[in-house]
């Protein structure tokens, strides 16, 4: 990540493009997308929040939605993400929505543990954000301030038309935020069991599933470790020796001191952090 920030954007591989296409297809199975032009950053955020509100209502009434955007505040920072799939349970004894993430694989085998660990971290973050938002932890004033937004700015005509057509008529970003917050009051906390689904890219067949329990202590340790990097409290870390196979797939491997000079002391501007989400 430090190389990406300092040197170049991460290259999109054929596998990454195939994965994105698969997610688009899965979304289109249950969500009808409509194009909308935006004219300012308030329009952009209004559209993100509106997409959540529409998707959450689809979940409540139809029991399933996909590619649901999340914007939340946790551990002192703003977090954004998109949940691949959320479904309501089929049993009446459990009314907590289940969060699911789909990963596509070039090979027809389950990934190694480090890759599964990253997938678990991602889903746990989404659950953590979800449950915080259900508990009404969305500080609107801080949201406007942090992203430099004018809550009373009139949205563009096209965005206002989209909100009205969707059943949530709004003139300003503040109107959309109120719909967003009100929608969370209708949702229960998410299910403690999370699901990673692995598909074979060649034919979209199911390779396997990884169901696991939410671990709040492990998650907070991971988040705090990431925040230390993002807040400048520590340098980036090299990939552990036992996970150096990752370097074969890294576009920066040829210039990373971890590979080019094992005896040198890494400089703050060249450390690689692929062992953690930071």
Image (cartoon, rainbow, N blue to C red):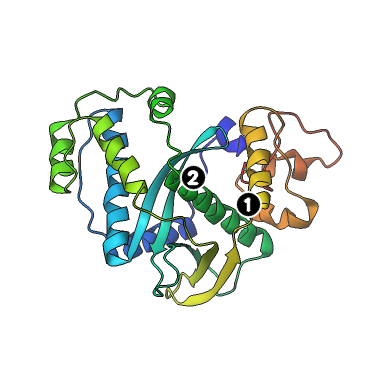
Residue at horizontal 73 percent and vertical 56 percent from the top: 243
For the N terminus, the image quarter is: top right
Q: Which mark is residue 97?
A: none
Q: CA distance from mark 1 to mark 2?
A: 12 Å
Q: Locate residue 93 relative to residue 180 in the image: left or right.
A: right
The answer to whether residue 222 shows anywhere in this view is yes
Q: Residues within 10 Å of mark 1 (few under 14, many from 20)?
A: few
Q: Is residue 14 above or below residue 8?
A: below
- Image quadrant occupied by the C terminus: top right
Residue at 27%, 41% (x, y): give it: 179
Residue 274 horizontal/vertical position (percent): 66, 46
Earlier sequence position, callout 1 versus callout 2: 2
The image shows residue 142 at horizontal and vertical percentages of 43, 26
The one nearer the camera, 215 or 21, is 215
Residue 162: quadrant of the picture = top left
Q: Position of residue 273 (x, y in %)?
A: 67, 42
Q: Which residue is mark 1?
A: 216
Disc 2 crowd rating (10 Å Cα; few below 14, some 14-19, many 20+) is: some
For residue 202, which quarter of the picture? Answer: bottom left
Residue depicted at 41% across the width and 56% down the height: 188
Q: Which residue is mark 2?
A: 132
Image location of residue 204, percent across then percent down: 42, 73
Residue under the point 38% across and 48% down:
69
Q: Is residue 193 above or below residue 122?
A: below
């Amino acid at each position: 990540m430090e190389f990406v920030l300092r040197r170049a954007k991460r290259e999109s591989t054929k596998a990454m493009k195939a994965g994105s296409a698969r997610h688009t297809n899965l979304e289109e199975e249950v969500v009808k997308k409509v194009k909308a032009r935006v004219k300012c950053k308030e329009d952009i955020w209004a559209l993100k929040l509106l997409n959540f509100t529409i998707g959450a209502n689809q979940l409540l009434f139809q029991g399933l939605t996909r590619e649901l955007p999340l914007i939340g505040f946790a551990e002192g920072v703003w977090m954004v993400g998109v949940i691949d799939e959320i479904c309501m349970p089929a049993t009446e004894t459990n009314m907590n929505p289940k969060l699911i993430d789909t990963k596509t694989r070039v090979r027809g085998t389950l990934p190694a543990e480090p890759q599964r660990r990253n997938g678990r971290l991602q889903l746990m973050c989404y659950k953590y954000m979800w449950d915080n938002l259900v508990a009404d932890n969305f500080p609107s004033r801080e949201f406007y301030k942090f992203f430099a937004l004018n809550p009373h700015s009139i949205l563009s005509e096209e965005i206002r038309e989209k909100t009205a057509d969707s059943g949530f008529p709004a003139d300003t970003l503040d109107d959309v935020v109120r719909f967003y917050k009100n929608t969370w009051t209708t949702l229960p906390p998410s299910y403690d069991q999370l699901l990673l689904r692995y598909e074979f890219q060649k034919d979209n067949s199911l390779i396997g599933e990884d169901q696991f329990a939410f671990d709040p202590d492990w998650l907070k340790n991971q988040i705090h470790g990431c925040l230390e990097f993002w807040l400048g409290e520590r340098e980036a870390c090299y990939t552990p020796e036992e996970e150096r196979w990752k370097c074969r797939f890294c576009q920066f491997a040829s210039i990373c001191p971890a590979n080019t000079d094992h005896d040198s002391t890494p400089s703050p501007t060249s450390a690689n952090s692929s062992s953690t989400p930071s």
